[in-house]
Image (cartoon, helix red, strand yellow):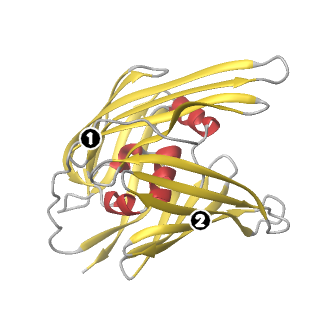
Amino acid sequence: MLKLNHNRLLQFAAALFLLSATTACSSKKEDPVPVDPPTGPIYQMRAVYVNGTRLDSFIYDNGLLKTAWFYDEKGKDWEYSNYIYKDGLVTRSENYQTSRTTQKMFLASIDSVVRSTGKLAVYHKFFDEATGQPRGTDSTNTVLDASNRIVAIGSKDTIRTQWSKSVDYIQITFTGNNLTMFDYNGYYESLSGPGSKDVFTSKYTLEYGNNRNVLYAEILKNPPLALEVLDVKYHFLWGANDVVKMKIIDGDVPGDIIITNKTVSNTNYISEQSYTSPEGPVKITYTYNVLN
């Protein structure tokens, strides 16, 4: 699992809509609206495709999401995470990557989740590919709302090292069960060589329809998966319903994006989301396990 950092978020901000250090900022919070339990067959999200390429796969055991596979489009290889639960909540994620030298999978990191009132921290331990020994640690700190959903990530405080200083923080607003505002602010300044300064901002609002996103329940109990989804690809999946409109308030290309949604036949489960980005048309397709 990859933690949030300014390089990853720069890619996220540049892509716009494909969708850590100390005390985080607060955000507007609203009580969730009860979601009616599904009737009939149970749907589990099995895979996510973007423009025909499978980018994510999910494996379940006794009703729990136990393994998630993620395709690295840049490196053209796979990584996966195994999740360990306690009392129905994920407490640990063991994350494997493909070695660029041997092409075999190796344990790259372990994420440990620590929950407390109003806060949640994910502690990352990284391992050396050649020796398997620990090579470093880091953490991602978040603020939770009354429903234990992440509503802030990172810190407004400046993080200083010998080589740089930076700020990274995200504020998230929920309305009912849906993420309706995403506000990212970042700053990075190199203190070595000639030096450079970069400011990154991304702010969106989202509107929803009435169709269901079944991964929402998994994201609520699995912080490492929630951060992976938000960081890498689609904050579409942080809501219980289907996004129908995204308004880019602050970003490279401000404006409205209309998302067209399709559902699995005779259900209200999302099967496809389509929209147009500056790079061209995007089609996200979801497949499911169906348990009768």
Q: Name the mark nearer the viewer: 1 or 2.
A: 1
Sequence order check: which comes first, mark 1 or mark 2? Answer: 1
Q: Quadrant of residue 190?
A: top right
Side of 4 relative to 243 (left or right)? right
- Name the foreground residue: 66 vs 259: 66
- Please provide percent x and percent y for residue 261: 28, 46
Secondary structure of the residue carrying numbered label 2: strand
Q: Where residue 29 is drawn, which disc sits there?
A: 1
The location of residue 242, given as percent across then percent down, is: 27, 47
Q: Which mark is residue 65?
A: none
- Measured as percent of width and height from the top left, residue 163 is found at 78, 30
Q: Write down the residue under mark 2.
A: 80
Residue 19 located left or right of residue 165: left
Residue at x 46%, y 47% (from the top left corner): 142
Check disc 1 and give the amino acid type: Lys
Q: Is residue 260 visible?
A: yes
Q: Position of residue 102 (x, y in %)?
A: 82, 66
Taking depth in this image into account, of 287 and 166 the one nearest to the observer is 166
The image shows residue 33, relative to residue 39, as above or below, that is above
Question: Which three-letter amino acid code belongs to the residue tagged 2?
Answer: Tyr
Query: For the N terminus, which image quadrant?
Result: bottom right
The residue carrying pointer 1 sits among few (fewer than 14), some (14 to 19) or many (20 or more) residues within 10 Å by Cα, namely: some
Q: Secondary structure at mark 1?
A: loop
